[in-house]
Amino acid sequence: MKLFGKIIKFILISLLIIVILAVILLVILYIRMKDTTNNTNPEIIERNISLDDALSKQMALALDKTREDGKVEIALSEYDLNEIAYAVSRKIPSSSNFEVLSCYMELDDENYYLNVPLKVFGQQTLVRGKLSLDIDQQKFSIGLKEVGIGKFKINSIFMNGVLSFFKSSLKEIGLETSFKNDSLNVSITRLKIRDLLNDALEDNEYKDLIIALYNIFFIDNACFDFKVNNPNDIKLIVDFSMFEGSSTTELDGIKNDVKTLLDNNTLKLADTAIAVNYFAAGYSHMSEESQKKADTALAASFDPVTLKSNSGYINRTPSSMSEIFISQAATASVKGINITDKNLTTIFTNLTLLGIGAGFATYDTHLVSYIVLDQFEAFINDDFLRLSLRININGYVINISCDFNVPEKDALSLNATLVDMTIGTKSIGDNKDKLFNFVANLISEEEDWIERGEEPNTLVFNFKSFFEDSSILSMLLESSPHPITKLYSNSNPSTGGFINIKLM
């Protein structure tokens, strides 16, 4: 019994010592973890700008001078960095035990310091560390060293324990993490960003176009440059001039029109993109889905009649393939039917493809910038067809050109097989499938005489219905059942090439 009593006594004394040590440790932790420092700029807190609005501002500013040199340049001031950081912190979910109060940067002549005020189990503290940025053609990396929580300096053992808890969750969203030499590193590759973008755009009608352009600009071509001369001089530059584009002012009226609505508080900043689409395309040439968005976004700006009467800045000429055939029916037996590349270009000006894009605006001054598809042109030579889609990047234009081999055919149709695709002067390579699918799907949906071929990357131009719709052409076809359809160049460059359908 005495032995049992000694054991009980030892256990009780041990438990008492553990409890006392635990209380002492908790008191020390409470004292050392407590840190009520929060130097967030009061103006940023008061404005409470959303992340979308903060990023829209930076994109509008970055594109503002693009027409001059083909470059998109993001230059972030300390205020800009903190505005974005605070907006990000507002999106982090809170609970009764954990709350992110803010996020801000502090700068000296050589370093950035990341500060994250938190509340953990009701206790306010501050996570702080020295920040480093590394961006190259493969990935974006952020390093954080000399990490501390309150008055605690975090060692590698503790940080690795914390990271192991979150690592799998972070990996699911594409972030790779590690802790080496007392430095926390978080990185994401550009390929993973593309995968996340692809998932986010699952139901977007322009998904193939956006993913293909992302691949071309940010993966396949080294047009991205990141410069940090010092913490107060950081620039991200995308150089589109490597694609040898040119400048135009054709759509600049969009900027003033959208700015006027924002100034009058009849348009929300979040609706800048649909307003850009509306002013570029004109209401009747918007897709049905975009028209519905415009009806809602612009209801405070225009009455329904005025809204639907806008014809847009993109130059369009009403035309149809049926009109081209009917106008030549009387001479078809002698000359056949000729469809010039200018005829095709005129028809293509009416596609809803033209006018789609993106729009950005600053929340304070309402500076507006845009990216819009604004031209679609055809060029014909002997057995050759080029279709060029133009991207207008705030006044700097680049052509995406699709080159087709189109052999002669003994029928009222032609098979056009894609042989090359370029953006400016550079070959697109593996991304041509997505771009072709995007263009081909939109054309074939609106012009039913253009069909997707059974072979990959093939279009079929089927003219049979235009003969059937005309009594004169139907009779000619009955008497000449062996038509030949062929592409020709023209000796007069101003006239361009043409498709000839000859009735034999």
Image (spheres, rainbow, N blue to C red):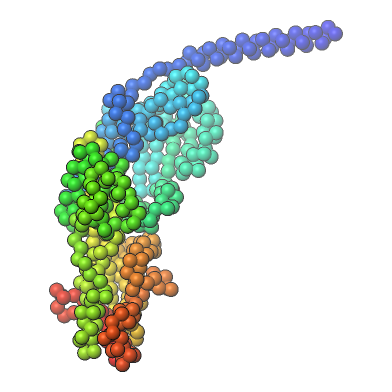
Question: How far across and how far down the image is residue 213, in percent?
Answer: 33, 55
Q: Position of residue 409 (x, y in %)?
A: 34, 83
Q: Residue at x 85, y 8 (%)?
A: 1
Which of these two is toward me, 263 or 139?
263
Question: Which image quarter: residue 408?
Answer: bottom left
262 relative to 345, above or below: above
Looking at the image, which residue is at 61% across and 10% down? 20
Q: Residue furthest bottom?
A: 479
On the image, the x and y values in percent for residue 486 come to 28, 82
* Residue 69 visible in the current orientation: no
Residue 469 vs residue 127: left or right? left
Q: In the drawing, does residue 96 fall left or right of residue 497?
A: right
Q: Is residue 199 above or below residue 147?
A: below
The residue furthest right is 1
Q: Is residue 427 visible?
A: yes
Q: Residue at x 26, y 75 (%)?
A: 322
- Quadrant in the picture for residue 470: bottom left
x, y percentage for residue 174? 46, 44
Indicate left or right for 449 with 390 as reference: right
Image position of 17 (left or right of 77): right
Residue at x 20% of width, y 72% of height: 342
